[in-house]
Image (cartoon, rainbow, N blue to C red):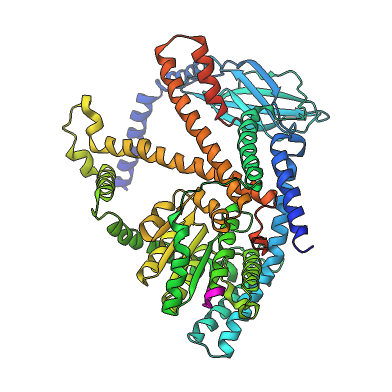
Amino acid sequence: MKRQVPLIITFIVGVVLIVSVFFPRVEGWNEDFSIFFDIIAVFAYFLGGGNLIRVHLDKVNKKKRDWGFSIVTLFGFLLMLAAGLFKLWNPGGFTADVAATGSLFQLMYDWIFNPLGATMYALLAFYVASASYRAFRAKNRDATILLIASFVILLGRTPLGVYATSWIPESFSLLQIPNLAIWIMTSPNLAGQRAIMIGIALGVVSMSLRLILGVERTHLGAGNE
Amino acid sequence: MIDSENSNKSAIFFVSIILSVFLPVLPAISQEAVDSADSSAGDPVAVFVPEPPRNVTAVDHNYDRGENVDVSWDLSVDDTSAMFLGYDVYRRAEGEGEFKLIGTVPAGVDTLQDRSTKADTGYVYKVVARTAQGEAPPVITERVVPDLEMVNFKLWNVFLIGLFVSGAVIFFISHAKRGKKLFIRKIAGLEAIDDAIGRATEMGRSILFIPGINDMDDVQTIAGITILGRVARVVADYEISINMPVARSIVLATARETIKEAYASAGRPDSYNDDMVRYITDEQFGYVAAVDGIMVRDKPATCFYLGAFFAESLILAETGNSIGAIQIAGTAMPAQLPFFVAACDFTLIGEELFAASAYLSNEPRQLGSLKGQDVGKLAAMVAIALGMLGTTFVEIWDSSFVDDFNWFIHRLFSIVS
């Protein structure tokens, strides 16, 4: 029963969502199911929040390694929760928008949360540099082609690329580095991307059918029975 | 006293000169101003009233729930004028007294789709061409009543392709059920899973499993969780630990259930504990920061990234690379695949992620679905070749058959909403 019910729900929802694409009368069911999911997800927040508190309280209690970080995590979580839930220092009072200008919630979001997120995102630039260094080493023929293509694209998007090949006559304009860069991006690169996307679309259809028909049930904790 | 009289005389003299110079001219100036005002009032360029648009029609948008009406018109003859601003479109529903503005489009645009109608309600539309100085006389359409259609015939091509691919998948599933042998090519990334877990066992370190940052309503997350089932089974067999930080609460519950089941089926239900899976945060970069911290502190021997990833893909994979972990990644996000290819040891590219659970299970019914998927791929290749030939021959031959064939192939693979 524990496995049959999810399988039946999956089958019904899957079939309804497919049908709703082709029949305008039931098109809205698609949105209805999304709303159902959102409602379930809201309740699941309690599960996530509870787990976070339990894991970190346990770490602090048992003085596990780096337990000091857990105190910071718990403090941040509870402070943000209180600021949002009770609308602390909100100029408009309890009835105002939770993110009203000047509220503690908004201040923490703007001055702590956002800068921290942006800092993590900014690290990406350095990671791109280190990954590119490894990926573009001319170890074999394929890597050499990749290196040349990336060099052309990099150069084609800088003023130097325009300057370096501007002497090439218009009749051979494809050989100008910026045009070559555009060609690489719109022809071989796009063709490769589309091939991957066609494969993904077919993979999604196949996976979805396995789920709808109950052939795939590992995600239900049902193993390979 | 004498000085004062002199200065008064000078002032009177100065004013008299000014008056004598300007007084005779003043009536002329004022008359000129009046004339100018009169002439500008009658000048047709100063107050530019455009010509109205012609053939204004409102028709029900086909194959929808009756919530769309297409309003279209022929452009005003003054549309190209520099002073022309655009068209205001008004609507009056049945039972309403006045027209209400529903949208404005700039010069050169001759359609507007009203997306807020109700089925079986009558509507009348009014289109007004406008410049900064004035408006053209409004043009009012015939009454239109949007319908709720039963079937969206515009998606016939999607239906046909879906039917073909689904039919092929179902056919090969039943084919495999009858015990027919199917050949499936080896996928290096999946073959490496056992070795990667074995390495972690030898090193006495844990395994890190990241199921992406999307929720369970994303099929990529489901694909990741299905692979988790297999990974957790091997982990349970080898008696090593698995660490799975997640970004969604529903994924937390699902992953726990999957791992618990894997440990039970491996005969080690006591080895399972809930802390193997823990919730971090829904926030993308907060999650990345926490996972990076876990990697740097715990130094897992093997990292799996299987699911939906965005900008965090490279941050995670590079951190994993820096701690010397074996990394197996898989995603269906085309923009993230190059990052995983550059930073990981094995990458499941797009469809391979979805094929993974079937491949790993080695169950005939699941393998049959992969074969059906391959038939879809073959059909796509044939269609691409036909499309190329059609587009080429249309340029060479002046034949209605080639034209129709080319149109059909293009229409078959275009989604018209």
Q: Nearer the viewer, residue B298 or B85?
A: B298
The segment highlighted magenta reads B236-243
Residue A140 image point, x, y percent: 24, 51
Residue B362 sits in quarter: bottom right
Q: Looking at the image, which is closer to me, B60 or B255?
A: B255
Q: Is residue A70 above or below residue B225?
A: below
Q: Position of residue A62 (x, y in %)?
A: 57, 90
**Would residue B65 appear left or right of A205 to someone viewing this image?**
right
Identify which residue is drawn at 30% across, 41% down: B6
**On-image quarter of the C terminus of chain B:** top right
Tell me the residue at 77%/33% (across/down). B118
When the figure is inspected, residue B126 is found, relative to residue A187, above or below; the finding is: above
Q: Is residue B107 left or right of residue B6?
A: right
In the image, what residue occupies the spot 27% across and 36% down? A180
Please identify the quarter of the rendering in which residue B92 is found: top right
Query: Is residue B44 something that shows in the picture?
Result: no
Q: Is residue B16 left or right of residue A65?
A: left
State whether residue B54 appears in this view.
yes
- Point out residue A41 in the picture as x, y percentages from the top left corner: 68, 61
